[in-house]
Amino acid sequence: MKKSSIFRGAAMVCAMCLFTTNSQAQIKAQDSEKAHDTKRFARPVNTGSNHTVLLLDTAWGSLSPEIGDEIAAYDVDGNMVSSIVYIGHHTGLALWGDDEYTTEKEGLSKGEVFSLKWWKKSSNEMVSLNMNSFERGSSNYFKDGLTVISSITVNAMLVQDMELFQNVPNPVSDFTEISFYLPSTSNVRLSLHNNLGQEVMVLADAKFESGSHKVAMKSASIQPGVYFYKMQSGKEKITKQMTVVK
């Protein structure tokens, strides 16, 4: 066999390997993008401290999650600390911990128990999940920790109430987004207040359809400090805290 033929064959093999590697990388990137494109839950705050949770596909047992369903983790105070879209195989969540450099609580504290919720896209139903067994770890948060869940069951059907999520990013240097969920169409007033309770800015005051929404906020005209954003719909009110930095 001529050397040129050998070289051409080797080059073809290398090209095929490179194509396969690039294709796999593209598929992984596309899967990651789909997994993080949540519709019901907001994007969690990246606090720089997290705990990895792997929900094995076999852990669902007789349950039947559908592609497009969403899973979220919450702290004991009902604050969402992670969200992901189910795309048909093992599900990995990054549970974000509390940022010790801010006064507000954005995530889980050391040793705090987390819980899981499952949103069924096709029926718009929300259920809480029982974590029955683990291959590794537990339902307690630890920085750089790892939990592998091997069995889950449905705990209870949940009523989807109005929900206000932590703004992302936080702290805010120039721009942030505030997400909220409405169980039914209603008027919403979203406003920003300083630590004296004075209203600084009205972010939204309009009628919103049922479902999830995002409102953008620019902080160029706001002085650095701690602020509170308040959401009111009818008699319901929810308040969360944000930090503005320059």
Image (cartoon, rainbow, N blue to C red):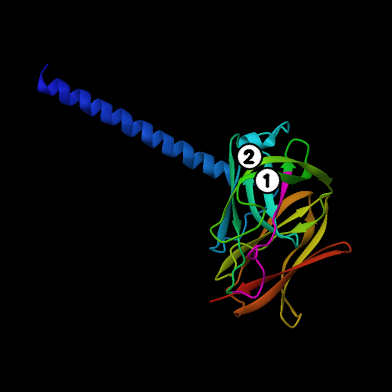
**Residue 125, can we see it?**
no
Q: Residues within 10 Å of mark 2 (few under 14, many from 20)?
A: many
Residue 57's spot in the image, x, y percent?
62, 36
Q: Amino acid at mark 1?
A: Ile
Give the number of the disc on residue 86: 2
Residue 97's spot in the image, x, y percent?
61, 63
Q: Main secondary structure of the magenta part?
A: loop
Q: In the rendered image, which quarter is residue 66 located in?
A: top right
Residue at the location (79% across, 49% down)?
Answer: 210
Q: Check disc 2 and report its element: helix, strand or loop.
A: loop
Residue at the location (62% across, 46% down)?
Answer: 84
Q: Check disc 1 and report its element: helix, strand or loop.
A: strand
Q: Residue furthest top?
A: 1
Q: Is residue 199 left or right of residue 110?
A: right
| Viewer-side residue, 238 vs 52 | 52
Residue 29's spot in the image, x, y percent?
48, 42
Contact check, label 1 and label 2, Cβ < 8 Å: yes
| Viewer-side residue, 203 vs 226 | 226
Q: Is residue 195 magenta?
A: no
| Viewer-side residue, 235 vs 60 | 60
Magenta-highlighted residues: 102-118
Residue at the location (64% across, 45% down)?
Answer: 134
**Residue 114, can we see it?**
yes
Q: Quadrant of the N terminus?
A: top left
